[in-house]
């Protein structure tokens, strides 16, 4: 049984109907309907096999779940340079927010200095999901002890108008307000973000349990009325 056949063996039609509604950028016919825990389990079974190697070297894929499986297999690559090479080959083939956001290679945490230089390249790309992956990686790995205010400037300078880019920028700034409030607030006060993104960042920060009531009250002052 090949990989695609195995994915269809795990198909859940009801889940397919539900999940397809969450991803308007993906053709429903390309969605099999495999729940994420089952897909992750399958990825662990495939890791470091010849079948997995061949699969990673075969792009593009046909099905949404193939792309998600690809993302999970990339997460286990232990060599940083090989991981970056594989991700760079894969990013142009991502066509939805879910596949983009679920990919978080373990090796990244051990090479944050080198990774930061790669993020600078990704964030300046033209491709929607390459930019989103860059911002999401900054949000996940660089808002605590590895935080630098230059990262705020990098994200604020993103000009791509695609909805999925603007949403991740808003998500980043909402998270930054939760973790690095004093450094981040000037970007809100000075209205450095595009209007929709500005208001969405404030909304998401106010919805977060990690932002204090005092800070939420202050953020209310900076919402722009349309």
Image (spheres, grey):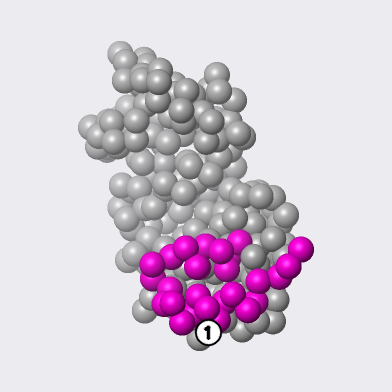
Residue depicted at x 36% and y 19%: 11
Residue 181 x/y as whole percent: 48, 81
Along the viewing direction, whichever of 195 and 180 lies nearer the viewer:
195
Question: Quadrant location of residue 56?
Answer: top left
Which quadrant is the N terminus positioned in? top left
When asked about the image quadrant of residue 94, the answer is top right
Q: Is residue 113 left or right of residue 168?
A: left
- Front position in the image: 124 or 26: 26
Visible in this render: residue 213? yes
Q: Nearer the viewer, residue 133 or 61?
A: 133
- Determine crowd level at label 1: few under 14, some 14-19, many 20+ residues with C-alpha closer than 10 A: few
**In the image, is residue 6 part of the stretch drawn in magenta?**
no
From this view, report whether residue 104 is shown above or below residue 71.
Answer: below
Q: Residue at x 44, y 23 (%)?
A: 16
Instruction: Count the marks.
Output: 1
Residue for point 59% across, 25% down: 27
Compared across the picture, whether 151 is left or right of 46 comes to right
The residue drawn where x is 32% and y is 66% is 110
Residue 13 found in image quarter = top left
Q: Position of residue 92 (x, y in %)?
A: 59, 42
Q: Secondary structure at mark 1?
A: helix
Towards the viewer: 23 or 220: 220
Q: Residue 125 at x, y = what percent?
A: 66, 56
Residue 145 horizontal side relative to residue 161, left or right = left
Residue farthest toward the right in the current orientation of the protein: 226
Which residue does the numbered mark 1 point to in the structure image?
Answer: 183
Q: Which x, y percent locates residue 174?
A: 51, 68
**In this view of the protein, can residue 54 be seen by the observer?**
no
Whether residue 204 is situated above or below residue 2 in the rendered picture: below
Start-end of magenta stretch? 200-226
């Amino acid at each position: 049984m090949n990989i695609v056949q195995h994915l269809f063996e795990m198909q859940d039609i009801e889940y397919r109907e539900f999940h397809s509604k969450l991803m308007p950028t993906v053709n429903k016919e390309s969605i099999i309907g495999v729940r994420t825990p089952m897909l992750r389990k399958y990825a662990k079974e495939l890791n470091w096999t010849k079948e997995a190697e061949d699969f990673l070297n075969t792009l593009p894929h046909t099905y949404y779940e193939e792309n998600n499986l690809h993302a999970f297999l990339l997460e286990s690559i232990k060599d940083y340079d090989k991981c970056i090479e594989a991700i760079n080959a894969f990013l142009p083939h991502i066509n939805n927010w879910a596949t983009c956001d679920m990919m978080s290679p373990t090796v990244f945490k051990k090479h944050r200095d080198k990774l930061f230089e790669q993020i600078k390249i990704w964030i300046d790309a033209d491709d929607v999901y390459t930019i989103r992956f860059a911002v999401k990686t900054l949000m996940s790995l660089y808002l605590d002890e590895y935080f630098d205010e230059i990262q705020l400037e990098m994200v604020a300078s993103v000009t791509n108008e695609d909805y999925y880019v603007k949403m991740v920028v808003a998500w980043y700034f909402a998270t930054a307000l939760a973790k690095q409030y004093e450094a981040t607030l000037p970007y809100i006060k000075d209205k450095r973000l595009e209007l929709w993104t500005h208001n969405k960042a404030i909304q998401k920060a106010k919805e977060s349990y990690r932002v204090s009531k005092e800070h939420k009250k202050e953020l209310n002052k900076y919402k722009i009325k349309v």
